[in-house]
Image: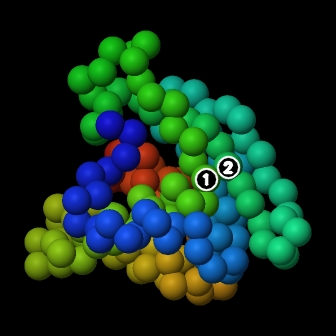
Amino acid sequence: MSEIDDGDLSPEYHQNKKKIPAKVFTGLSYVIVTAVEGGSYTRDDYRVWKEYAHADQADGSFRAGVTVIPNRHGPYADLDKDKLPEIRVTPEWFHAQLTKLVTKSMSMIDDGDKAPLKGRLLKNAILLLMGDEEVPGDCDVVDSGALLQAAVYGEVIYG
C-alpha cells in the first residue's frame, strides 16, 4: 500500500533504478529538502516525519531522505492509525513514484482534471526526471511539498 500501482512500468525499470543520473538524483534530493524544511506545509501533510538527513556524496551528488507516516487519506484512508506504513522517501523511491505519476498523468492528458499531476506540477516532475538543473531551485516549498504529497498519496491531497 505504500507505493502507487506500478503495473504500467516495464519490469526492467526496477532493475535499473540505481542508475539514476547524478543530476536527477541531486535534483530530487533538493526537492525533498525544500519540502521538509519548508515549514508547516509538510508537517500538516503527514502524521509523522522523522529520520531526516541530507549530505553531499563522494561522487559530487547530493542525497536527502526522510521517513514519513501518512495521514489517513488517499490509499491509506481505510487503515487503522496504528497500521499506517512508514515510508522512507529517498531519491530512488521519489524517482520511481514520480515516474509512475507522470506516466499516469500523461495517459490522462485528455481528462486533465482527473490526472494526479497537472499544469506546473506535471511540468516540474517531467523536468526533474529529465535532469533539468533549474527546476530544483525554482520549486518553492508549495511545489516541493505538493510533489512529495503526490508521491506518497498518489495525488495532491492538500493545497
**Left or right for 43, reference 151:** right
- Report the residue marked by disc 1: 90
Secondary structure at badge 2 equals strand
x, y percent for residue 134: 65, 84
User: Residue at the spot x=46%, y=66% of the render?
Assistant: 15
- What residue lies at 27% left-to-right and 28% top-to-bottom? 77
Which residue in the structure is indicated by mark 2? 65
Query: Which amino acid type is shown beneath numbered disc 1?
Result: Thr
Q: Quadrant of residue 62?
A: bottom right
Is residue 101 rendered to the left or right of residue 106? right
Choose top left, top right, bottom left or bottom right for residue 97. bottom left
Q: Is residue 46 visible from the viewing direction of this image? A: no
Q: Position of residue 95 (x, y in %)?
A: 50, 65
Tell me the quadrant of the picture where the N terminus can be found: top left
Reading the chain from its start, which is encountered first: label 1 or label 2?
A: 2
Which amino acid type is marked by label 2? Gly
Q: Does the CB distance between marks 1 and 2 fall below 8 Å? A: yes
Query: How is the structure coloured here?
Result: rainbow
Determine whether the residue tagged by mark 1 lies in a helix, strand or loop: loop
User: Who is closer to the viewer here, 12 or 55?
Assistant: 12
Mark 1 neighbour class, 10 Å CA radius: few under 14, some 14 to 19, many 20 or more: some
Dot 2 alpha-carbon crowd within 10 angstroms: few under 14, some 14 to 19, many 20 or more: many
